Amino acid sequence: MPEGKSMLDPVKPEDSYSAKTHLHQPVPEMATVAATALPADAPEAALPSEVRPEIITWEKLVEAIHASGKAYNMEMIEKAYDLANEAHKGVCRRSGEPYICHPLAVARLVLDLGMDTESIAAALLHDVVEDTPTTLDDLKAAFGEEVALLVDGVTKLTKIQFSNIEELQAENLRKMLLAMSRDVRVMIIKLCDRLHNMRTGDAWPEQKRRDKARETMEVYAPIANRLGILNVKEELEDRSLHYLDPVGYNEISKMLSERAGEEFLAGVSGVIERRLEESGIEGATIKRRVKSIYGIYRKTIMQNKSFDEIYDIYAVRIILDTLAECYSTLGLIHDMYHPLPNRFKDYISTPKPNGYQSLHTTVIGHEGIPFEVQIRTRKMDEQAEYGVAAHWKYKEGLDGHDKLDERLAWVSQLLENQRVSEDSGNLLHDLKSDLLPEEVFAFTPKGDVINLPAGATCIDFAYAIHSAVGNRMVGCKVNNRMVPIDHIVSTGEIIEVILGPADKGPSRDWLKIVRTSEAKSKIRNWFKKMRREENIQQGRDALARELRREMIFIPDDELDEFISSCCRRLRQNNAEELYAAIGYGGITIANCLPKLKEEWQKRKSEEDKSEQLAKVDLSRVHATDGVVVEGFDNTPIKFAKCCSPLPGDPIVGFITRGFGVSIHKQSCVNAIASMKDPTNAPRWVKAYWADSVKDSYKAGLEIVALDRNELLRDVLSALADIRVPIYTMNARQVENNCAVVSLTIGINNTEHLNRVVARLSKIKDVLKVTRS
């Protein structure tokens, strides 16, 4: 947490660290990310929305750079400031101050995290490409490729048109994550940019405040957490909460101010310090903190706990020199205070995914107040305070890139998953699920630790081990007991995955069960490789159904050509690839529809201009396939599959593009809807059955009957008795002990069909026969 000056013990400014501190109290003159949170004369109890943060000037930034004690390239930083100042000249923020104050404040935050010269220069320049005529080539020529790439990573995509705001957000996020996977400094600059925007968010309109706060809460705070920059993460959460639920925020803030927590922690810290000295553990640094407002909010409001049921509101942090001292101190703490059962966590032997290491134990103070004790080494504390930024603050920089690559493996994994799933909407969903703050730790029978987000299932566990394990999974044991494969994993469980045959594959239903993007990606990948033909057929059928539901009526033989014309806009090479992607879940139909609708409207407008229909002369002409269409002689005819008209049904014709006339029943819902559309109405023409209709037409029937043995035999016998040809038959069980038999048969006309229906209705246990 950022460090703030204690109001109780002025001798030791490092004695107080608090999520509340950097929002509510004056901040000491030291290099910390909280240094620009509030001006020095801010009221002690002020809320973040009630006090403007300190306005950073060039002089103040230079003073802070010199005070840091690190060797910076001031020539590059000053050059960056001059260019940014000139580019933003005459522009003001909504809050009224000159725009250059924002890049200066972001640069100061980047400096406080201990970042390098290039990062500070990029922070000063981070908005010039997006908001001014300055180009990336200009920056590359003036500052080199490294600074230009950092600025490009933070710059939003403003020149490209997107169908909706969600797609724009997803693509901006994808661009930033890709840049972050190459250089994590991109995300550190972006987090500092968002932090300062949230500190000055009162100038935004109400809706924008809430949208930005929600995006910050769902995306940027979790990323800060995963990068281990916990003080930035907690301030982003607190400020977002203040905009999203000001009432809840104020209630918790009031409860904290009514309790003498700081005084209690000061007394406990003194007692612990004396005991450590008596035990020969010297040089320990003791800090104290009050839990962040959002941290309390999650437990009181979202988990329905009372204030007194939260045991880690108050915490003391003990920072030591060696690992051995950490475990020795843990024993002393448990000797001094009564530890609460099941409240001990050893994050040193099992670090969190963001690299956080510490011993946590909750004890009851002599006043009866529970508090948490965190014990760690100095290096662990640096890592907890600054996360990946510690590489620069403590002079490792990009030299520690091997460790950085390990820390950022989740970004590469997420982007790799997105290559399989080219649906931009999945990125936001997968990122949120992968960045959940809660994790669980489960074990394989060999003792390997598998880390998963809270809510993950045994299927997620199997795929976390290896894709081949997940694909062959047929069951699992938890603590040596069989459980369903959708069992929610809890910390400490020993899970054994039971494997099936080598050619066993996953179920499509697993996509609805699994929680992690890694598991979803591997399941989709299996279907993509192993079930291509099935995927194509499923995707095509699903897309055709959805188009009809959206009142987009495309003849079946024209669908592939229509979809192919839209494929480039949907980032697919051809119609088959799009169908396959829909079939295996790599892209959703909802994301395809906007572009398909645009193409459909474009085609309809072109047809209306080019297609002048000849007037029907009402003269009867030659019949084709037993149908007469007024005004057309021997035109190609096809029967619409949506209603399957039969001789005897009143019919109507629709002039299709490039084929002929499609025949529908007059009562067909698709035909009725299309006739109401002014653009389609001229293409509907009169049609009727000729005297010389052909012998047989295909008709669909559905039989609902009580499920029993020999039902199918009786149906087949009845149709054989009346000499009706059968083209297809399908039977299935349904609820209420019933069965459904679907048939495609050959009949001559509606009168013939009615006789067939009457015969089938007489079969024992048949409840209903309908035309499908």
Image (cartoon, helix red, strand yellow):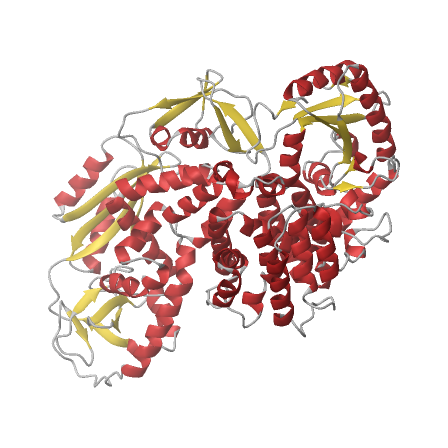
Q: Nearer the viewer, residue 570 or 692?
A: 570
Picture quadrant of residue 12: top right
Left or right side of 172 for 211: right
Vertical relation: 563 (above or below) 721? below
| Image x and y of residue 261, in percent | 84, 34
The residue located at (32%, 57%) in the rendering is 572
Q: Is residue 141 above or below residue 316?
A: below
In the image, is 290 to the left or to the right of 181? right
Residue 709 falls in which quadrant of the image?
top left
Q: Residue at x 77, y 52 (%)?
A: 48
Relative to 518, say whether 128 is above or below: below
Which quadrant of the figure contains the N terminus? top right
Please give the name of the residue rendered at 71% of the width and 42% of the height, measured from the top-left corner: 294
Q: Is residue 678 left or right of residue 365?
A: left
Q: Position of residue 55 (x, y in %)?
A: 76, 60
Q: Position of residue 207 (x, y in %)?
A: 66, 61
Q: Is residue 455 visible?
A: yes
Q: Of 386 and 647, which appears nearest the observer?
A: 386
Where residue 100 sits in the image (x, y, percent)?
A: 67, 65
Q: Nearer the viewer, residue 39 or 320?
A: 320
Asked if residue 245 shows in the view, the reply is no
Question: Which one is nearer the viewer's eye here, 739 or 368?
Answer: 368
Where, by quadrant of the figure, is residue 210 drawn?
bottom right
In this rendering, the count of numbered labels is: 0
